[in-house]
Every structure is written in structure tokens, then in C-alpha cells.
Amino acid sequence: MQSETDHEGAPQVVARQVKEKFGSLRFHAIQASERQRAMIRLARVLSLRICEGCGAPGTPRETGRHATLCDAHADARNRG
Ligand SMILES: [Zn+2]
């Protein structure tokens, strides 16, 4: 996104809020171009496919709280 600002004349993205909700990334920004907003949507979609523990392929799970996890990290959570 910063490259879009630096080289393509897009506005400077300002994050108003960044958090996790139901296992996915929520990135609320002001002053983002359509292309930058598409990047944010892509990151959100990817956050539902990538384990938050290790970066391996994962799926959204409910293990006491919502999280996107690979099988190994889901097993570790279920064992407590
Ligand atoms: Zn993992």
C-alpha cells in the first residue's frame, strides 16, 4: 500500500483501527484508494487461510475463541 502512495499518487493510508475479529484481520483505514482497499480485502481473506501461530495453511476454528489455525496449532489449543 505504501508503494502505491510513494509511486502511484495514491493517498497516504492511515490505519484507524487494526484488530482481529472471529479469527480474521480487520484493518479499518481512512484515505485509501480503490486499489489499496482491494489490498486490505485481500489481506483479510488471506488471514482466514493462514495459521496465526506459524503461517502454515489454516482454517477458521472455534477453540475457546475464534482463531485461524493449522491442524497442529488447533490440536495444541484443544489439549490446553
Ligand atoms: Zn500453525
Image (cartoon, rainbow, N blue to C red):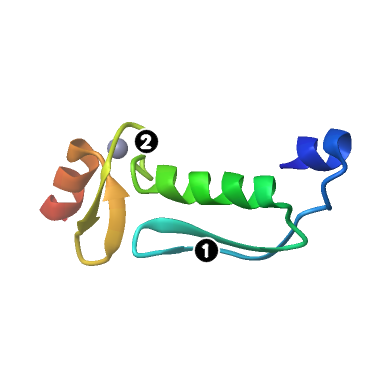
- How far across and down, in percent of the image, does residue 65 sit? 27, 66
Labels 2 & 1 near each other (Cβ < 8 A): no
On whether ligand 1 comes within 8 Å of the CB at mark 2, the answer is yes
Where 19 falls versus 57 (above or below)?
below
> Which percent across, then down, holds residue 76?
18, 45
From the Cβ of disc 1, is ligand 1 less than 8 Å away? no
Q: Quadrant of the C terminus?
A: bottom left
Inspect the image, locate mark 2, and give the three-letter code of the amino acid beneath it.
Cys
Left/right of residue 30 with respect to residue 37 in the rendered view: right
**Disc 2 to disc 1, C-alpha distance:** 18 Å
Q: Position of residue 63 (x, y in %)?
A: 19, 60
Residue at disc 2, secondary structure: loop
Residue 64, relative to residue 44: is it above or below? below
**Which badge, 2 or 1, comes first in the chain's sequence?**
1
The numbered dot on residue 19 is: 1
In the image, 1 versus 58, the foreground residue is: 1
SS for callout 1: strand
Q: Is 47 placed left or right of 61 in the picture? A: right
Residue depicted at x 11% and y 51%: 79
**Quadrant of the image containing the N terminus:** top right
Quadrant of residue 52 in the image?
top left
Name the residue type under label 1.
Lys
Vertical comparison of 30 with 49: above or below: below
* Residue assigned mark 2: 54
Name the residue rendered at 34%, 64% in the picture: 22
Residue 79 is left or right of residue 16, and the answer is left
Quarter of image, ligand 1: top left
